[in-house]
Amino acid sequence: MELENEKIESKNFIELIIDKDLEEGRFDHVQTRFPPEPNGYLHIGHAKSILLNYGLAKKYNGKFNMRFDDTNPTKEKEEFVESILKDIKWLGADWEDRLFFASNYFEQMYEAAIKLIKKGKAYVCDLSPEEIREYRGTLTEPGKDSPYRNRSVEENLELFDNMKKGVYKDGEKVLRAKIDMTSPNINMRDPIIYRVAHMTHHKTGDKWCIYPMYDFAHPIEDAIEGVTHSICTLEFEDHRPLYDWVVRELEYPNPPRQIEFAKLYVTNVVTGKRYIKKLVEDGIVDGWDDPRLVSIAALRRRGFTPESIKMFVDLCGISKSQSSVDYAMLEYCIREDLKAKKPRLMAVLDPIKVIIDNYPEDQVEWFDVVNNVECPELGTRKVPFCKEIYIDREDFMEEPPKKYFRLFPGNEVRLMNAYFVKCVDYKKDENGNVTEIHCTYDPETRSGSGFTGRKVKGTIHWVSARHGVKSEVRLYENIVDEEKGKLNEDGTLNLNPNSLTVLKDCYVEPNIADVKPEDKFQFVRQGYFCADLKDYTKEKPVFNRIVSLKSSFKLPK
Ligand code: ATP
Ligand code: MG
């Protein structure tokens, strides 16, 4: 039937704008870009921008440019170029051979400034930064013309040339666009477009001592590359008239257009570079990729997949109004992604030894266990069972409350994939901690044997004490708690002291011999885990909990 194949597609507002532009012939193709400043690591918000820009290019059979917006030499570092490219590649956005650096266009930007001067649309201004601020006016008061506003073209050309030659000190002179000091939009009150800065640039070295301002450089970069839709975040909405002014005055034949959307904010996480830098410097987190952070590198190390991030970003949607998205939605996405894809293993995080008194001392049985009941293609594995096993401490109670169906004195439970066992005795140390549990097993009850004699209410997981692989497991909570207030009164982060728990004596069933860093699986009943990208070794396995299994999160309708 025809109808069934027809998917109803709802488009976001950016797609509607693009459709209209193509229909009306404003553009005959689509070209987008992702333009990070190489001054830090990318975070989940940037992921949204990357996937949006890349996704639009794909959807419209267009082009996607990767461009470093490296026009500001103060904060930029080469190391960030590498990390940013690595993160973008990992996310799956492919720029092919379209990698650009805005600093490659310095010459063209300089020419563009000359063009404006010649048109009488730019002038060199000698006002000090404080004076420029004073002359600019306020939201309620218009600005005043600079006394240097009416310099002749010749004088401006000469002074701008001197700026370029290094005749002036930083801040001594600037080049300003000549627009309108009375404009209701402060960005249009003769904005600075070039400044003197005697600084070494990571790519161009000391070739330049004048650098273009962002609002002037960005539209030129877009225009040079043939970008059609320059997508940025809402704070640039008021800059759009200047963007349009620049491309219009420079007479680009098919000028790009700027479209703004709302930034992505996520609850209970920290994205501000300033805060993260402090957390790193204070040693509270283990670098920019600490699994409690939401830099792309941190999400990856925690065990999030590109697919889960894409799902998250798609669920968030694109809008013009600012809002925060619940971190639980990100967790929902990774569960959805992993649940039918990854094998399930047994792991004991807080072990107590169980001795099965009537099980033969030297016997080992290998049970065939299905790797993931939701995904038969993942096959089966062999899990060893013997007289001594570990179970999790919370699966045993000396004096259980009502409705506790796990192990307690006299009670019988199923050991997952194995036998029924009954607790007959237990030992405690001088502090009252249970150190050892004794059980008996019933050979008739072997899992898969079709035994129907009696039922038990509880099933618990276990790991053979003789075969289990001792491992470290790291459990996480949110690094800040939104409800309690993200910030303290003094402006510092209100940190959750329990954001990291390191368990050093965990036991994982031995089927992890081939595990590599970044491999992911479910530990039954415990959650989804990822072999740590940095610290996992065969000799000392380290697993990060990505997310627990339970959630109160409901997908918004
Ligand atoms: P931050 O200060 O959070 O690091 P930024 O805006 O300084 O962000 P840029 O390198 O300038 O970082 O950003 C590159 C691109 O990513 C820009 O187009 C910007 O609009 C976009 N971007 C940054 N933060 C977010 C966010 N939270 N949600 C969506 N897009 C974002
Ligand atoms: Mg920035």
Image: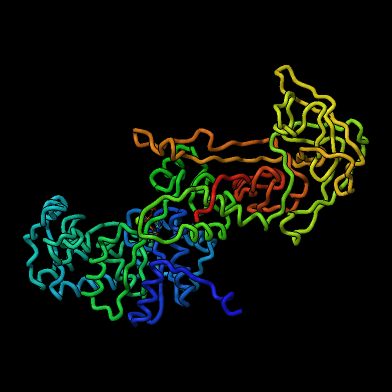
Q: Residue at x 50, y 48 (%)?
A: 327
Residue 379 against residue 481 in the figure, above or below: below
Along the line of sight, the residue nearer the viewer: 423 or 499: 423
Is residue 84 visible in the rendered image? The answer is yes
Along the line of sight, the residue nearer the viewer: 188 or 423: 423
Q: Is residue 416 left or right of residue 523?
A: right
Residue 215 against residue 453 in the figure, above or below: below
Count of numbered labels shown in the rendering:
0
Q: Percent x, y for residue 408?
A: 77, 28
Is residue 211 visible in the rendered image? The answer is no
Q: Percent x, y for residue 10?
A: 46, 68
Q: Percent x, y for residue 328?
A: 52, 47
* Residue 406: quarter of image: top right
Q: Quadrant of ligand 1?
A: bottom left
Q: Residue at x 49, y 35 (%)?
A: 496
Q: Percent x, y for residue 426?
A: 80, 24
* Residue 425: quarter of image: top right
Along the line of sight, the residue nearer the viewer: 386 or 537: 386
Q: Residue at x 61, y 40 (%)?
A: 474
Quadrant where the N terminus sits is bottom right
